[in-house]
Image: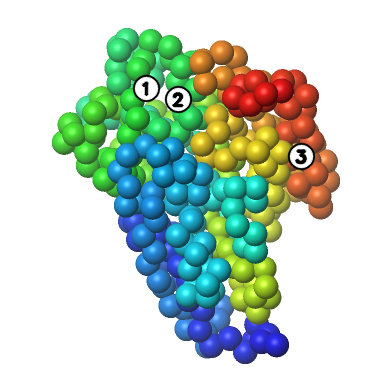
Amino acid sequence: MTSATDLTTVRLGTRPSRMAMEQTGRFADVFRARYPQVLLDIVEIVSEGDRHRGPLSAIGGKGAFTRNADRYLLDGRVQATIACAKDVPGPHDRSPGIVIAAVLPREDTRDVLVLPAGHPATTLAELPPGTRVGTSAPRRSALLKALHPTLVQVPIRGNADSRLRALDEGKLGADVMIAALAGLRRLGREDRVSEILDPAVWLPAAGAGTVIVEHRSDDPATGGLLAPLTHAPTRILLDAERAALATLHGGCLTAASAHATLDAVSGVVTVHAAVLDPAGGTPLRASASGPATTPSTVGQDAGRQLLDAGAARLLGRPA
Ligand SMILES: NCc1[nH]cc(CCC(=O)O)c1CC(=O)O
């Protein structure tokens, strides 16, 4: 059997978008510094979500950004794939046999308001009624309806950098848009932030700001090589948030939020989870705390509380 120390090459699949290439480049630097003897070969894999310009639901929704990369991984064309945790479906929406190997340090989890270039900064609260706000994420649409009911949500698609360009050229079909701060930073476009949305009310996505590297569960050699590159505190937060979402059977197409914090002194992880009302009603919220040694149990606890409180109704499923 191949052990981690025998590997001479690792092929790493990535989406070719600018944001993805930036995060892949950062990971590659860390990998090459630790393993100068191993060749890291970056393989660009275009996802269905990149190719298809219509609504994601039309191409099966969940997994649109990861399904093609999963195929490369499962048939051995690559040994590892890198992606935004937010875009990676939970175990129930995915072929088995793929596991998280490395988790990069968490970046900012907040969403921001972005205006066309040259507009003076403003806030969502100050935008005139009827302003068209571009976003396709169900979480963001539900938050917009609940918190800013006079604004109009319009769906947008495309990579973060092409959205920004379309917004500036007036071709986005929206007057302003919502984006992730972490993503804008990766593109070097933090200057475009008009308002950072308060995460206490504008609830963050599970896995926001977190980049992960995955591998096949039957390939422990690659797993062994990647595991030491994990940022342990982020792994705890991510496991807690993803367990909450998985308990709800949710993914990036679910109007839900999960946000974990870790108290390094007490070793306690806390998860705040919420299921939002697509119609703009008050979100259902729950939280749970427990030992950081079992973050998934803590996340499941928060998720179960939401189900007990009737979350299935908001998720569009029979209770
Ligand atoms: N669905 C696209 C996506 N996936 C991850 C990020 C941002 C970076 C991150 O949260 O890691 C974005 C862009 C956005 O939401 O604006």
Which residue occupies the foreground of this view, 261 or 8? 8
Q: Earlier in the sequence, mark 3 or mark 1?
A: 1
Identify whether 182 is placed above or below 214. above
SS label for mark 3: helix
Q: Amino acid at mark 2?
A: Ser
Query: Where does residue 41 sit, x and y in percent of width and height?
Result: 43, 77
Circle on res. 153: 1
Quarter of the image with the C terminus in it: top right
Name the residue located 33 percent from the left edge and 56 percent from the top edge: 18
With 99 as the anchor, is 111 left or right in this view? Answer: left
Identify whether 40 is placed above or below 170. below
Quarter of the image with the N terminus in it: bottom right
Q: Earlier in the sequence, mark 2 or mark 1?
A: 2
Q: CA distance from mark 2 to mark 3?
A: 25 Å
Query: Where does residue 315 sit, x and y in percent of width and height?
Result: 61, 26
Its colouring scheme is: rainbow
The residue labelled by disc 3 is: 300
- At label 3, counting other C-alpha atoms closer than 10 Å, the crowd grade (few under 14, some 14-19, many 20 or more) is many
In the image, the residue with mark 3 has its CB under 8 Å from the nearest atom of ligand 1: no
Q: Could you tell me if the residues under marks 2 and 1 are in contact, i.e. CB atoms within 8 Å?
A: yes
Name the residue located 41 percent from the left edge and 44 percent from the top edge: 59
Q: Earlier in the sequence, mark 2 or mark 3?
A: 2
- At label 1, counting other C-alpha atoms closer than 10 Å, the crowd grade (few under 14, some 14-19, many 20 or more) is many
Q: Quadrant of residue 221?
A: bottom right
Q: CA distance from mark 2 to mark 1?
A: 6 Å
- At label 2, counting other C-alpha atoms closer than 10 Å, the crowd grade (few under 14, some 14-19, many 20 or more) is many
- Residue situated furthest left in the rendering: 169
Inspect this view and state whether residue 276 appears. yes
Q: Amino acid at mark 3?
A: Gln
The residue labelled by disc 2 is: 141
